[in-house]
Amino acid sequence: MRKRAKLDVKSMPATAANAVDERLQVARPLRGLLNKVFPDHWSFLLGEIALFSFIVLLLTGVFLTLFFDPSMKEVTYNGSYLPLRGVHMSAAYESALNISFDVRGGLIMRQMHHWAALLFMASIVIHMFRIFFTGAFRKPRETNWVIGIVLFILGFLAGFTGYSLPDDGLSGTGLRIAHAIILSIPVIGTWTADALFGGEFPGDGSIIPRAYIAHVLLIPGGLLALIGAHLGLVFKQKHTQWPGPGRTNTNVVGERMFPRYVIKQGGFFAIVFGVIALMAGLLSINPIWLFGPYEAAIVSAASQPDWYVMFLDGSTRLMPPWEVRAFGHTLPPLFWPTVVLPGIMFTLAGAYPFIEARRNKDKTVHNLLQRPRDVPDRTALGAMAITFYMVLAISGGNDVVAETFEISLNAMTWAGRILLLLLPPLAYWAARRVCLGLQQHDREVLAHGVETGIIKRMPDGRFVEIHQPLAAPDEHGHTELEYTGWVVPKKMNRIGALAPAIKGFFYPVEEPAAPAKPLAGSSGKELETSGRQQ
Amino acid sequence: MTATTKEHGVPTTAGPGHEDRTRFETMRDGAREDGIEIVHYEPPFPKTGTPAERRLQTIVAGLFLSTGLLATAFVVIYIVWPWEYDRDSLISNLYTPMLGLTLGLALVCTGFGIMIWGKKLIPHEIAIQERHDGPSSEHDRSVTVATLQYLGDEMGLKRRPLLGLSLLAGLAPVGAAVAAPLIGGMIKDPHKNVEGRDDSALMTTAWNTGIRLAREDSSPVRPEDVSVGGQITVFPDIPGGHTNRYADSPTLLIHLRVEDMDRLRENLYGINEGGIWGNFVAYSKICTHAGCPASLYEQQTNRLLCPCHQSQFLITDNAKPIFGPATRRLPMLPITVDDEGFFVAQSDYKVPVGPGFWERP
């Protein structure tokens, strides 16, 4: 028998590639993938933070399932945490305590999971702001906007079910309120609540195991599928881009996916992961051992839910005591702020792209982003929505505010009620004015140039400020530059005047930078390239 | 701008320039086939081996090596650090922070290393790719529509309407069959009477005639156990009465001052009449708003405050809601004292306890 050929390590990649291509014909699609162009801007990274935190959630979540026991069976605690020894509690709470104290590295995993969840929701919201204020949701991306809203709702549910699992004093109160919210729904409320909880609160011990399976399988499954669809659509429809030199509605200007784009993404993932790990190690989150097991008769003040639930807590607190009682039926006040209000909020948010398109009779495809100032109505509407949300969220912690600043709690509630109606229109008006003002300033700089800060005294004693025109001015000192929907340089260093000073800040400048060119003569070309691409 | 390819787009970095050049060009031509034009390509270090380049290289390598060190430190700490919880031991309390620091910094170092590599050492480029937005071509559309229509013809849905209808009629129950076990398994009649009572769990609590008021440790309560102006939480004296199994039964027993009690006596209304005993009154602890325990007792103002949504109830007026979102009074548990001198309930609450619901009268 012939001796087998020596293993040729060098040719292995080629052999493997050949083997794959012979079977799957990947060469062409792979090349397309490697070369696919992505536009670059810092604000495009916000959605990625959500994606990366989701990956951290999956990794740490798997670890936690290995030790968590989703059971409401009553046990007596006998673990390492002395203050709770001998206390009767549910097996769920006991195992959550064990993860914190008796599993090696369990606490950091729990805290990573919780921090990642908070970051996940926060980055979804910030990402949504970016999409909204730049008009990235317009045709053809309405579907992805709606998917994004559903992702937020799923994330909310994932957060709430996960937060409920340890069955500690705080989360049990949260479940109690959730039960009351379901109970408040007309006609089907009692039936739904009893079906979910397996009887009158807290039910027959079903809710924790049910929340568990929803939290570890059903909701993450939905999230995973929708995140896949979300990214798939971004990939298929290609990313939006800011206007700028060479950028049109029919092209993408940026970097190829490999190597730079992917490398930056990889680095960013490691940083997000690292920051979550740092937070988990150094900042305590949800210290369940301090809350004790859930007991129906015990609650403490300042019991706030996670931040993304705060707006519901706030709306519930601000709701006036209005109850409908008629024909032997009751419609509790809890129904309006916790079922109807979020229903309206999410429906309006989901429908917004269609509402705006209809209002503007806009059926064209938009791949170029808009600066928020250029669409004052939308920006103002967004400011209004955010203000509304913020008043609710702050009211969700109004007892803490009242205590910290020694304000009457009732005054806080009334302030919340009034400001909820007053502030949003004010925010609308203010944001609109700011947008128009910024627009005007852009036009002014384009016409007259950048303020240099140099004050000149004229022979007749007047003082004038010297403006640096952005192009060669006409005989009236005006420049005829068109606004291109992108940043207008407003400071001298944005047009290169300060660059040398910055360059040598940390290291000695190796090569002396070329002296700044006289800008007056450099015409409109200078402006074109001032829209920074990276 | 799209059409021009700048001359300095050719890399001049690596040594054997010729081969690199062809490889770059092959790549660029390949990209062109996919509708991608690389219009600007600029190595960050046109001259190789400059101190600046070497310094960057050192920084990146240093970051990667730090990652290795920190990750190793993480593993070592994970294994050898005393991790068992000990409240008084600083070392043991530092376990989680040390893990976080080493893992976090390790990952941040890798991240920055990769980032600097990608941003500073790899050639800057501007590439332009054409989009292909808008609808498919007229031809593709009409052919696909025709194919779909022909699919209908092939199935013969028009000619054989019975097939479609019967399929629908057949599938609908299948859908119901899928839903049935789920709904059937979970559903519970919320209006079924509780064993031994003639009303449902929503309308009743564990309290009943003659059941003693007990503390959490099941010891019964005498009037002299609660000082004037004081209050304690009581539970029905039945097995497990203080557990979450009877989550709607916790009750607040309050010993009012004489003048406050006089005010309450004046205000006592309908169903609450006869529910008090001496200067003692007992209200449900379960808030009528969302079911949290309304347990913050303000002795000075005689208010009960629910910490969840800040509903406030006035004890001297039948626990009437006077602030916040709650709409209904806290139900009063009618109490008296039995032959042995312990508090007992005269009956169950007269109205349903806790948050409102549709069927509540």
Image (cartoon, coloured by chain):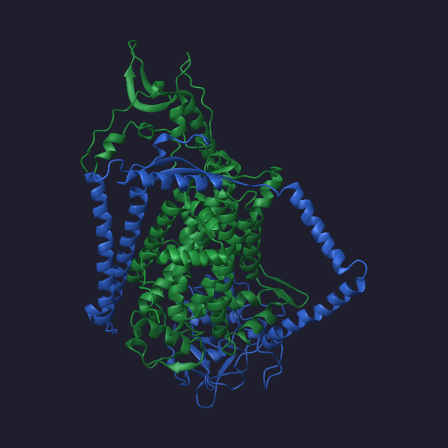
Residue nearest the viewer, comparing A6 with A425:
A6
The quadrant in which residue A280 appears is bottom left
Q: Is residue A447 visible?
A: yes
Label total for image: 0
Q: Is residue A517 left or right of residue A137?
A: left
Residue A415 visible in this rendered orientation of the protein? no
Please tell me in which quadrant of the rendered image residue B273 appears. bottom right
Answer left or right for A233 relative to B47.
right
Farthest front residue in view: A1
The colour assigned to chain B within the rendered structure? blue
| Place of residue B36 in the rendered image (x, y in percent of width and height, measured from the top left) | 46, 39
Q: Height in image: B7 above or below A281?
A: above
- Residue closest to the far right: B159
Q: Where is the N terminus of chain B found, in terms of image quarters?
A: top left
Residue that appears at 31% across and 74% down: A103
Vertical side of B271 occupied by B108: above or below? above
Q: Residue at x 60, y 73 (%)?
A: B182
Q: Nearer the viewer, residue A356 or B328?
A: A356
**Is residue B210 shown left or right of residue B17?**
right
The residue furthest top is A460
Q: Position of residue B320 (x, y in %)?
A: 52, 65
Q: From the viewer's side, name the closer residue of A176 and A440.
A: A440
Q: In the rendered image, which quarter contains the C terminus of chain B?
A: bottom right
The picture's colour for chain A is green
Location of residue B238 in the rendering, given as x and y in whole percent from the top left corner? 47, 86
Using the image, determine if residue B113 lies above or below residue B199. above
Indicate the position of residue B88 as horizontal and vertical percent values.
21, 72
